[in-house]
Amino acid sequence: MIGADMPPRPMIADPRVARPLTRKLSRCGALTPDEIAILDDLQSATRVIRRNREIITEGRKYDTLFILIEGVSIRCRILHDGRRQILNIAFPGDFIGFPSAFSERALYSITALSDCVLAPVPFSRLLGLFDRQPRLAAAVFWSFACEAAMYAEHLIDVGRRSALERVAHFLLELLTRLQVIGLADECSFRMPLTQELIADALGLSVPHVNRTLRQLRDDELVSIEEHIVIIKDVEALSALADFQHSYLDQFRLPDLTAAH
Amino acid sequence: MIGADMPPRPMIADPRVARPLTRKLSRCGALTPDEIAILDDLQSATRVIRRNREIITEGRKYDTLFILIEGVSIRCRILHDGRRQILNIAFPGDFIGFPSAFSERALYSITALSDCVLAPVPFSRLLGLFDRQPRLAAAVFWSFACEAAMYAEHLIDVGRRSALERVAHFLLELLTRLQVIGLADECSFRMPLTQELIADALGLSVPHVNRTLRQLRDDELVSIEEHIVIIKDVEALSALADFQHSYLDQFRLPDLTAAH
DNA sequence: CGGTACATTGAAGGGGCTCAATCCACGTGG
DNA sequence: CCACGTGGATTGAGCCCCTTCAATGTACCG
């Protein structure tokens, strides 16, 4: 019932705000027109990658990052016997290619789950940002810090949470992240992943993901129909999952006076 | 048998090289005397934290990072019912406090496992590095990138590896990390963690960690006596754990010509 | 209309957990 | 000097959560 065929509707951030990264960062504090112009410029030159193609290939060398403008991509590792662990899921406005860009050869592959639009950002250009735009530099750091926080929660998911807690937490994280870029309502969104992908992200088997989702539905905590996920009781689900909304939502741009 | 009482010998990086971070970064490429001086200076002002005290407290605000000079610290999250997940383990030469320093309030606590010596590094000072010392700036990025790679492997551990593979992988990661800072020989080191800590890092129970270590010993892959771990067959253990030495060891400083 | 991709459900088995006891080394205070 | 407390390692028994294997259902597509 979830994500039966993947892209009936593409993953495109709200067009009322020009660029997804600009939208995301503007939630951390008011941006000056100057800063907006620079950010938008970073996201202007774009490149399209088709569904199921690799954006970054393990073992190759890269000296650019990408900003994901449209679409969904995953970074993952496949063990010799076929087991797969999805390390993270990128949505519009996310940086892609860290830490690959800092290593001699990319450690993991990044694959486009749907058709993706990317904006390449040469690493040197990113470093250049740090000179003239300390607030934007901090914002980029913020972006990486936020990703690190998601990593941490992801680790807690697979390390110490039960399947039910894991799936609940995962749904809430998706809700929150998609809200930031205008792809989710107050309490609902279109599931961009198949159950197989959810399983590989959470370290579960597909049948068990299915049963777990069923239980969440039976317990009237969520509703899932036609790929649309509705969180029917955010409070109860958050309590069940030990979800702290804050970890995705408490970063702030520094004051202009805070320059070095 | 492992780590019966924790600190018979303290965790101090090889004194032949002045500072652990300097030692670590010098493996990524030759440092100029200038760069060494700056790095050493970063690590000069120090502060001592006693065993079992918190270095960073969840919920508080911080505007400095720390470089761990001596000792071992862990970042972890404790769920409401007492389950604990260790997010990462810091050794001398590691940065501590990312991403806490970028958030309104620290998301996780960091605790000293042994008496620790820390060098505070105000965030503003770190940003200042980016102006004048692009190679060092890149090296700091490298440090975070390396941490991100460890996070990724950690995630694969708990998500998709069996207990045996997990523990094997963990031992190899410890070996590699400790070698870098001169705290491990070719194939042996002093285990700095109790089995309870290993369990909470790997998402296992204490009894099962114990049984798993026993199996590794029975299989003649490792030997553990008096807290000293000897990897008797690095090749076989690496194969078992799907361990790729490269992920901790392939970062390089950029050429001086690569300035922005 | 067969093929593909995904969701769903059931049955059986196992890997790792819980609970609980025991052992051991060490430090402390009487 | 010994009794005791403490932190940690070790081991066993039983069980349960989740996996594996397998089958079925279903929408969509060329």
Image: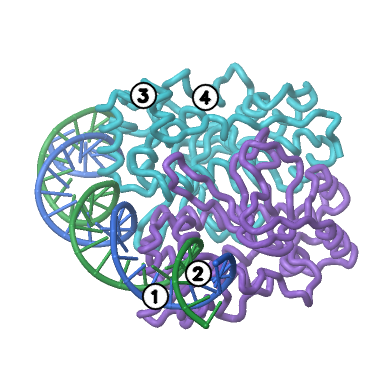
Chain colours: A cyan, B purple, C blue, D green
User: Which residue matches tag 4?
Assistant: A179
Report the chain holding disc 1.
B
Looking at the image, do the residues carrying marks 4 and 2 touch, with CB atoms under 8 Å apart? no
* Residue closer to the observer: B201 or B227: B227
Residue B107's spot in the image, x, y percent?
Answer: 60, 40
Amino acid at the residue labelled 3: Ile
What SS does tag 3 mark? strand
What crowding class fits label 1: few (fewer than 14 Cα within 10 Å), some (14-19), or many (20 or more)?
some
Query: Residue A14: x, y in percent?
Result: 55, 21
Neighbour tally class for label 3: few under 14, some 14-19, many 20 plus, Cα within 10 Å? some
- The answer to whether A132 appears left or right of A10 in the picture is right
**What is the three-letter code of the residue carrying label 2?**
Leu
- A150 vs B72, nearest the viewer: B72
**Mark with earlier residue (4, 3):** 4
Do tags 3 and 2 sit on the same chain? Answer: no
Residue drawn 71% across the image and 64% down it: B70
**Among numbered discs 1 and 2, the one appearing first in the sequence:** 2
Residue B69 location, quadrant: bottom right
Q: Which residue is mark 2?
A: B171
Residue type at the position of mark 4: Gln
Q: Number of numbered discs present? A: 4
Q: Is residue A165 visible?
A: yes
Horizontal side, residue A97 vs residue A51: left or right: right
* Element carrying mark 1: helix
CB atoms at circles 1 and 3 under 8 Å apart?
no
Instruction: Give the residue displayed 85% in from the left and 46% down from the top.
Output: B128
Q: Say if mark 1 contacts mark 2, CB within 8 Å.
A: yes
**Chain under label 4?**
A
Report crowding for label 2: few under 14, some 14 to 19, many 20 or more residues within 10 A (C-alpha). Answer: many
Residue shown at the point (41%, 35%) measured from the top left: A241
For label 1, the residue is B216
